[in-house]
Amino acid sequence: PTAYEAHNQLVDQGSMGFLLLAVGFVEFCASAVLVEVSKGESDREAGDYTLDPLSFLKGKSDEDVKKMKTRELLNGRLAMLAFGGVATQSALADATHAFPYF
């Protein structure tokens, strides 16, 4: 099957339903912080999960931290656009080159 047809097979199999529930559960658990921030009980910035296992931001100035966060946002947005392009091409093309194009 093509990558586009694989999605429908996973929906029929039930795997995508489980994935939806798992992601929904994680989002629900993370939403408690939003309530704390709205009440003023937390000073955490939006999107800051303090995840830096390789210590890229350790010892950096505030300007460097802001620059790294901006790069991360832009790279993530570029990756989402690229994936959207791959998915669209796979859905609309004549499937002469099915993803992953090897």
Image (cartoon, grey):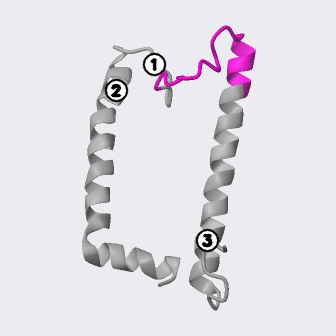
- Does label 3 or label 2 sit earlier along the sequence? 2
Q: Is residue 82 above or below residue 28?
A: below
Q: Amino acid at mark 2?
A: Val
Q: Residue at x 44, y 14 (%)?
A: 43
Instruction: Name the residue tied to disc 2.
Output: 33
Point out which mark residue 44 bears. Answer: 1
Magenta stretch: includes residue 5: no
- Does label 1 or label 3 sit earlier along the sequence? 1
- 55 vs 14, left or right, is right
Point out which mark residue 100 bears. Answer: 3
Q: Amino acid at mark 1?
A: Arg
The kind of secondary structure element at disc 3 is loop
User: Where's residue 87, x and y in %?
Assistant: 58, 72
Binning the other alpha carbons within 10 Å of mark 2 as few (below 14), some (14 to 19) or many (20 upward) gives: some
- Badge 3 vs badge 2, beta-carbon distance below 8 Å: no
- 63 vs 6, left or right, is right
- What's the CA distance linking mark 3 and mark 2? 38 Å
